[in-house]
Each structure stands twice: as C-alpha cells, then as structure tokens.
Amino acid sequence: MRRRPERLVFVDETGTTTKMTRLRGRARRGQRLRMKAPFGHWGTQTFIAALRHDGLTAPWVIDRPMNRQIFEAWVETQLAPTLKPGDMVILDNLSSHKSEKANAILKERGAWFLYSTAVGSKNALLQWSTSTRAQVS
C-alpha cells in the first residue's frame, strides 16, 4: 500500500441538523425578531462520501441520520461501482459501518476493508506513519 496511494479509499460522513439554527438574534428596538427554521421543521441531513488521492467519489446526501440500512444501500449503489480489486477501504468505527452485508459487498468487489481505531484515530494514524517513517530512515 505504501507505493499505491490510488488504492486507498477513506470513507467518512458528516451531518447537520436544523437544531443548529440560532435561537437568539437581534431586531430593532420595539420590533420582534421572527425567523424560520430551514425546511420548516426539525430535520437532519447526512453527507457521506469516499475520499481517494485524486478527489471525492460516491458522494451522497440523505435527509435523515445514518443507520445500517442506509449505509448498506450507499455501499451497494454508490461505493461498490467505483471500487476495483485490491482497493483498501478505510472506515471509522461507527456501529452502522459494521454491517455483514456491506462487508460482503466490499469483498465481492475484491476490496479490502479496515476499521480505524476507536479513540483518536487520526492521531494514531499520524503516529503510526511517523514511527514507520523513522524506522525506514
């Protein structure tokens, strides 16, 4: 993998909710401030994508929180078609990512998968790469 960065596929997601809407604001003296929440109701949007060395692949936005069924659908319809045999898919340690169906789809495409560590995954990966580089030098 060290010499084949094009094989690495990092999967991550982020979300936003209308509960992030500001609850306070400013208005002219004597006037009441009136604002509406986006969508007109409380809601959540989730964005999930895969990152390769040359850009994002398989971007997907859904109007609800992530769960196992949605993740499986994303893997099957969006991610799997972009994978080649030998690709290494790196997932975070989210419970919805630990799906047997999703893992079977990845294996069927010939891709490897790896879960990042639960605590401080970015720091652990950075420390690992730094220590490995020191050993090679």
Image: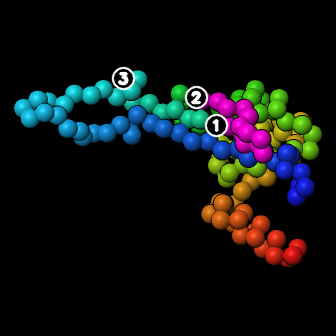
Q: Which of the labelled discs sits on residue 124, or is there none?
A: none
Instruction: Give the magenta-colored segment's residue range.
Output: 49-61
Q: Nearer the viewer, residue 115 or 57?
A: 57
**Rendered location of residue 30, percent (x, y):** 6, 32
Q: Secondary structure at mark 3?
A: helix
Q: Amino acid at mark 3?
A: Gly
Label pair 2/1, CB-CB below 8 angstroms: yes
Q: Tell me where residue 13 sits by quadrant.
A: top right
In the picture as drawn, the residue positioned furthest to the left comes out as 30
Q: Is residue 67 visible?
A: no
Q: Residue at x 78, y 74 (%)?
A: 131
For disc 3, the neighbor class at 10 Å (few under 14, some 14 to 19, many from 20) is few
Q: Nearer the viewer, residue 38 or 43?
A: 38
Q: Which residue is mark 3?
A: 40
Q: Earlier in the sequence, mark 2 or mark 1?
A: 1
Quadrant assignment for the N terminus: bottom right
For disc 2, the neighbor class at 10 Å (few under 14, some 14 to 19, many from 20) is few
Q: Amino acid at mark 1?
A: Ile
Q: Nearer the viewer, residue 137 or 58?
A: 137
Q: CA distance from mark 1 to mark 3?
A: 24 Å
Q: Which residue is mark 2?
A: 62
Q: Is residue 132 visible?
A: yes
Q: Which residue is mark 1?
A: 48
Q: Tell me where residue 73 sits by quadrant.
A: top right
Q: CA distance from mark 2 to mark 1?
A: 9 Å
